[in-house]
Image (cartoon, rainbow, N blue to C red):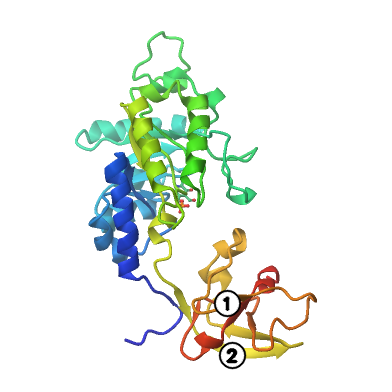
Amino acid sequence: MEIKTPYYLVEERLLRRNLSLIRDVAEKSGAEVILAFKAFALWRTFPIFREYISHTTASSPYEARLAMEEFGSPAHTYSPAYTEEDMPTILRCSSHVTFNSLSQLRRFRPMVEDYNREHPEKPVSCGLRVNPEYSEIETELYNPCAPGSRFGVLAGDINSSLFTPFPTDGRLPIAFHSSLPIEGFHCHNHCESSAEALQRSLQHLEEKFGQWLPRLKWLNLGGGHLMTRQDYNVPLLIQLIQDLRRRYPNLRIILEPGSAFAWQTGPLVSSVVDIVENHGIRTAILDVSFTCHMPDCLEMPYQPVVRGAQIVEDSESHLSPLTSTGWVATAVSRGTSWARGTSTTTCRWGRRSSSRI
Ligand SMILES: Cc1ncc(COP(=O)(O)O)c(C=O)c1O
């Protein structure tokens, strides 16, 4: 079947390979691994996902609806900030709701309490995002633990009244007089990280928040666990979670990766629309763009791999040709992914082009 470019192509065989590995990790470690929609929300693939996993994570009312209405199970929802308008949908479509700050918790805890009173058959479990002030993410923009970060509550701000269902000494801050205890912590501080990075993170997390962990029901270790990457130390990940569960048998451990599910499961297919030449640099103009189709490549920045292409090393001069036959992609359409047909064999990707946005 001929499909018009541009399009994202998911290869079912590759997706199932990732899903099998992830299910295996979940079974062996005892953690629940759920899908983060932020990284992958192609809902036509959900029937396949359902063969391997049961839940997803949402960060907006629409994602929560996607979980409930298309994936078929309530979401684990976390957002940096909710509004009164969001909350009814979030509560209807979620099993777990994590708050990013104590002020958000104070503001919405009464709504959750009311909801749970009215829906005793499916109460929502409340969690708090915590900030371990430790992350190995090198790109500051992506580092949720950078100084001044908006993400999560610092250890010094946690207080035991958060976990107490009813006020016990009459001296608790009025805002925390609630029949709804915090049941879980959520910590997201990885991005395409290794199991070794998780090992170091856990040390920091336990150092800062360990005293509260025996009082919780669940611990969500966020996303960024790239367990489907070839060099990922899967046995170590399994071991770390098994050990964590042994130390805190009260805790259900949850991982919510996104990228690990989608990792190398198919290309963004584009066509070469034109080739132009200037000062010996030949540039392929494609029908995709970084801004529209690969925004992470601008932020992170990533350099997309082009199937069937080869990297051409920088030449000395800024403007000299990369190779006599080489191409670079343009500023507006460097979104080269896979140039089809005869183009594929001659396509070249110049490193230099990545700095010419
Ligand atoms: C809170 C949270 N959970 C999960 C994820 C998914 O991360 P990844 O796709 O790197 O696994 C993200 C990504 O930003 C996130 O912010």
Label 1 sits on what residue type? Gln
On screen, residue 353 above or below 346: above
Q: Quadrant of residue 238?
A: top left
Which quadrant does the C terminus fall into? Answer: bottom right
Considering only order in the chain, which callout, 2 or 1, is on the residue closer to the N terminus?
2
Q: Quadrant of residue 347?
A: bottom right
Percent across and percent down for residue 38 are: 44, 55
Picture residue at 66% right of the left edge, 90% below the top: 276
Residue 111 can be seen, yes or no: no
Element under disc 1: strand
Percent across and percent down for residue 167 are: 38, 14
Percent across and percent down for residue 253 are: 35, 37
On screen, residue 352 above or below 229: below
Label 2 sits on what residue type? Asp
Q: Nearer the viewer, mark 1 or mark 2?
A: 1
Left or right: 16 as drawn, with respect to 308 = left
Picture residue at 37% right of the left edge, 10% below the top: 168
Picture residue at 45% right of the left edge, 43% below the top: 82
Closer to us: 250 or 122: 250
Q: Are marks 1 and 2 in contact (CB under 8 Å)?
A: no
Q: Residue furthest right?
A: 317
Element under disc 2: strand
Residue 171's label in the rendered image is none
Please name the residue that numbered disc 1 is placed on.
310
Please name the residue that numbered disc 2 is placed on.
274
On screen, residue 287 above or below 209: below
